[in-house]
Amino acid sequence: MVKTHERNGSRAAKLLYRPFGLAGSVVGGALAGLVFKQIWKRATPGENADAPGALESEHGLREILVAAALQGALFALVKALVDRGMANVFAKFIGEWPGD
């Protein structure tokens, strides 16, 4: 476990981490999208396995809101996991925590 004083990253570490954080966000977003599509496909069997969009009139508001809430929760979860994992790897190799 990293000690508290080692968790306070320098300005250089924060700047150096930015490209890693950006790449992690892109990968995390793509991964979250794939996970959401698979969950939605399994949760709603049938010919229309795609999640409903807000402007699709054939879906009710309840279904649209459930899909949006699930998608938002998954994106937040995956983003937190990817961000934390990237920060841990960065700290392991660089020796400084990129946040705080």
Image (tube, rainbow, N blue to C red):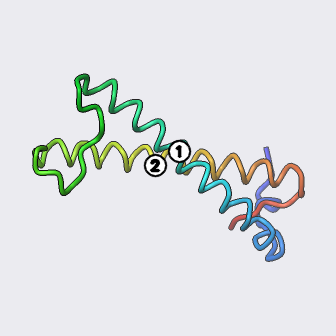
Pick the quarter of the image with the N terminus.
top right
> For the residue marked with disc 2, what is the amino acid?
Phe
Specify few, some or many for label 2: CA neighbours under 10 Å numbering under 14, 14-19, or 20 or more.
Answer: many
State the image quarter where residue 15 is shown.
Answer: bottom right
Label 2: element kind: helix
Q: Is residue 98 left or right of residue 50?
A: right
State the image quarter where residue 94 is shown.
Answer: bottom right
Q: CA distance from mark 2 to mark 1?
A: 5 Å
Image coordinates for residue 38, horizontal then vertical, percent: 41, 30
Q: Which residue is mark 2?
A: 75
Q: Which one is in front, 74 or 38? A: 38
Position of residue 56 relative to residue 66, above or below, is below
Asked if the residues shown at circle 2 and circle 1 are in contact, with their CB atoms under 8 angstroms apart, the answer is yes
Residue at 69% across, 46% down: 85
Q: Is residue 94 left or right of residue 53?
A: right
Specify few, some or many for label 1: CA neighbours under 10 Å numbering under 14, 14-19, or 20 or more.
Answer: many
Image coordinates for residue 23, horizontal then vertical, percent: 68, 57
State the image quarter where residue 58 is shown.
Answer: top left
Q: Which residue is mark 1?
A: 78
